[in-house]
Image (spheres, helix red, strand yellow):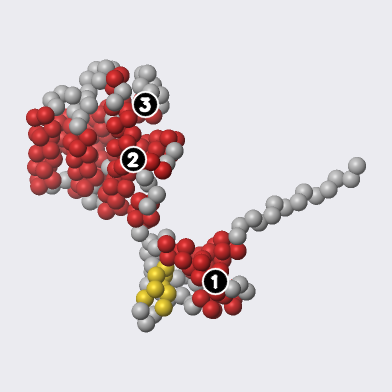
Amino acid sequence: MKKFKKLEPMDTGSLVDKVEIRLLAFFKENNLVPGDAIPKELEFAESLGVSRTVVREALLRLRTLGLVESRKHRGMILKQPDIINNFSRILDPTLLGEDTLKQLFELRLILEMGMADFLFENRDPKDMKELEKIVEAEEANSPGKIRFALDKEVAFHGKLYQMSNNITLQGFQNLLLPVFEYVYLKETKNEDFDDYHFSGGKFVTHRMLLENLKVGTPETFRNAMRRHLEPHFDNAFKKNGIK
């Protein structure tokens, strides 16, 4: 029996999809940077052999992503996209599946473990005093508890993100806040959460993290933060019966 060569898969992308991809390639091939003017719709249409309507739709997509914009007297220019703003449009917990929410929450855990060096590099007396006030307010309402009020949890960790002095990291923190709130509330409503047995024998509180930030090192702080977040890590790995 004769052996046939395999058929190559057909390109099922729409014409607008193809033009969008080609425009992005054009920007790269011509080394365009934010602020550079780009050709007019008609020029793109003639070069690509498609209608202006198709080009307009492709450019509209890129404008929605924040990659291009119209400027008076200059026409269309390339723009640096606002990545955080683009993500924020779709990161509504009610619109995302459980698996996506879980992975986004895990991303937040990863970020909090990774910021230690930046905290120690950028900490200053003013920030430390503000962090102290946050901890004091928390202790006045829920001393020694594992289950913090959400606003206190957000205030403490949000201040750490701010102290990193990394604008993009702060943006991600704000971006992931609705996801954090959704998953955090879901986890802490579980009765098993208060009975969680920490591997180190006790819960690492925000006070302990603050004291570590005062006199410790990035490495000791990372270890303390890992123990502080241990119930959430174990829930991610489905350990210790928290589900």
Q: Which residue is mark 1?
A: 53
For residue 39, side relative to residue 158 (left or right): right
Q: Residue at x 24, y 17 (%)?
A: 201
User: How many C-alpha atoms fall within 10 Å of the one at disc 1: few (<14), some, or many (≥20)?
Assistant: few
Q: Nearer the viewer, residue 172 or 101?
A: 101
The quadrant of the picture occupied by the N terminus is top right
Q: Which mark is residue 235?
A: 3
Query: First in sequence: mark 3 or mark 1?
Result: 1
Q: Is residue 218 above or below residue 40?
A: above
Q: Which residue is mark 2?
A: 179
Q: Nearer the viewer, residue 10 or 25?
A: 10
Observer able to see residue 200: no
Q: Is residue 49 above or below residue 122?
A: below
User: Residue 94 location in percent, x, y?
Assistant: 38, 41
The alpha-carbon separation of the residues under discs 1 and 2 comes to: 38 Å
Observer able to see residue 150: yes
- Identified by mark 1, the residue type is Thr
Q: Is residue 234 above or below residue 47?
A: above
